[in-house]
Amino acid sequence: MVAESKDPDLSKLELINVPGGALAFELAAKFCYGSNFEINTVNVAHLRCIAEYLEMTEEYQEENLIVRTETYLHEIVVKNLDKSLEVLGACDGLDPTVEEVGLVDICVDAIAINVSKEQLVSGLAHLECDVGSGKLRMHCQDWWVEDLSALRIDYYQRVIAAMRRTGVRPESIGASIVHYAQTALKGIERRHVWDSGPLVGDNQRVIVETLIDLLATEKITSVTLSFLFGMLRMAIEVDAGLDYRIEVEKRIGLQLEMASLDDLLIPAMQTSDSMFDVDTVHRILVNFLRRIEEDDSGELSPCGYESDGLKSPSHSSVLKVGRLMDGYLAEIAPDPYLKLQKFMALIELLPDYARIVDDGLYRAIDIYLKAHPSLTESECKKLCKLIDCQKLSQDASSHAAQNDRLPIQTVVRVLYLEQLRLKSTVSSSSHQHSSGCDGGGGSLSQRMTMMCSGSGVPSSCVSPRDNYASLRRENRELKLEIARMRVRLTELEREQGVMRQGMRDGRNGRALLASISRGIGRIAMLGGPAAERRKTKNSSQQQQQPQCWDGGKSRRGHKASSSSVTYAES
């Protein structure tokens, strides 16, 4: 450079883009002037790059700096996993020279080969035999997983790809990905919408998208469902591309039955939209149902990865998802910004056989109606049509019959089904009483036999004549009670006809509700004196605001796995 300079008074040279900076140049100068220094894993990458920059080849001197560094790399570094990791970490900041000399590729291949050897040797050393089952099991902890987390994300991606080519176990690769994500994305979940900056917008997004790319090629069993939900939340936080989010959602959909309610409660990033990310849950549910359809039709999964280790979705899995979604609907229902279309879309997505009872769905719809009083009558009708009244339990039906938030048509439908159920119960009870009367003779003979002593002489306490008279009296009372129940049932049927005629004639809602109340009162009369007492108690409570049905329990649970069902308080 001095010889090529046209300045005769040149006293200063400026070296531009020197790899490794002043420290690397000082080491190269010491090498030229014969000063002693040690080549090690910390400075070998810098020395190799500065030697390339200064053209320190064999053309000028034998065993020049390039040859010295290459010898150290091939004889010491590539044979040791720990040293290969240290040198690759030291390559950061030496671009593009470090790529041009191929140092990164050398370290990546060395790491992959050494990990494969380490895993094989360590696995054989820790191989044990289970005496009880006669099976072999392997106990091996991969110490290098933590060291890989210190690498730059692009270097880490290349190392994982090389490991896959050399046959490293997918479980170990999955554990490494999880550890890298936990280390590199620590603290990002505490970020708010207004905290976006260059670091979060670029570097963290690249990390999340790269890790999702790596996950796309791994088996589904190598990472846990909680980690997948964590990655999905991270992707939303850093505003990753939609394709990356969909990839994670597909993997979650393959094992949705193992998710919890807290997993699905993903906050929405847009402050003007709903509080929870309903669209993401909708897509996850679509993927789960698609998995069921593919399993039923025997088709292969169109996803770009295998689902090894997962069983076919049984009916119990579908029921679990049904209960999970009912709990999710109840949690998002109080959101005043949740649109009716999104709420109904989630309900309609599940098939009918996903719910044995509709109590959970009724609870969610009841909460939504309370939180959205501005819904029109047509919208309320459309929403309540999604409830299968035949699947409501007796307690839920009783609550629905007195729920002022429900449309009149829904209340009438519930009352009609309750009447049919009551009629069926009365008919079966009448049949049982008739059967009991036919077998009265045998009962009489048994009683008379028990009244006799061991010698066959009747007891002096109760005579056979008095016992026979008592049985006849009980029989007459039973027949009279059956006759009364039949008369009351006839009155209920007549009342139902009046209700239907009133609806046809277009009577006002107040008259119709009065007729419904009379029908409820007559239903309560069928229970005898106990029912009359309950009716008196309920009439005093109806003067107040209607209380919410809690399924017989005072506490409210929000877990999807809980068996208690709670409705919105009025």
Image (cartoon, helix red, strand yellow):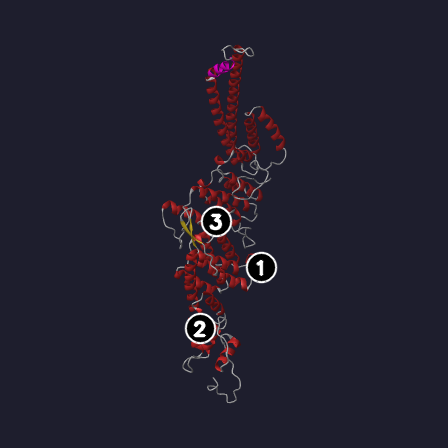
17 left or right of 302 in image: right
Of the two numbered discs 1 and 3 on the same chain, state the one appearing first in sequence: 1
Where does the image place residue 474, in percent across and percent down from the top left?
Answer: 53, 16
Q: Name above or below for residue 215 compared with residue 59.
A: above
Task: Name the amino acid type tagged 1.
Answer: Trp
Of 182 and 58, which appears nearest the observer?
Answer: 58
Q: Is residue 217 visible?
A: no
Disc 2 vs disc 3: which is toward the camera? 2
Of the two numbered discs 2 and 3 on the same chain, state the one appearing first in sequence: 2
Where does the image place residue 160, in percent across and percent down from the top left?
Answer: 44, 61
Of the two numbered discs 1 and 2 on the same chain, state the one appearing first in sequence: 2
**Residue density around tag 1, few if under 14, some if 14–19, many if 20 or more, within 10 Å:** few
Q: Name above or below for residue 51 compared with residue 544.
A: below
Q: Residue placed farthest to the left in the image?
A: 298
- Indicate the secondary structure of the residue bearing disc 3: helix
Where does the image place residue 273, in percent across and percent down from the top left?
Answer: 54, 52
> Which residue is identified by label 2?
72
> Which residue is identified by label 1?
194
Q: Is residue 384 visible?
A: yes
> Which residue is identified by label 3?
282
**Residue density around tag 3, few if under 14, some if 14–19, many if 20 or more, within 10 Å:** some
Q: Which residues are magenta?
A: 442-452
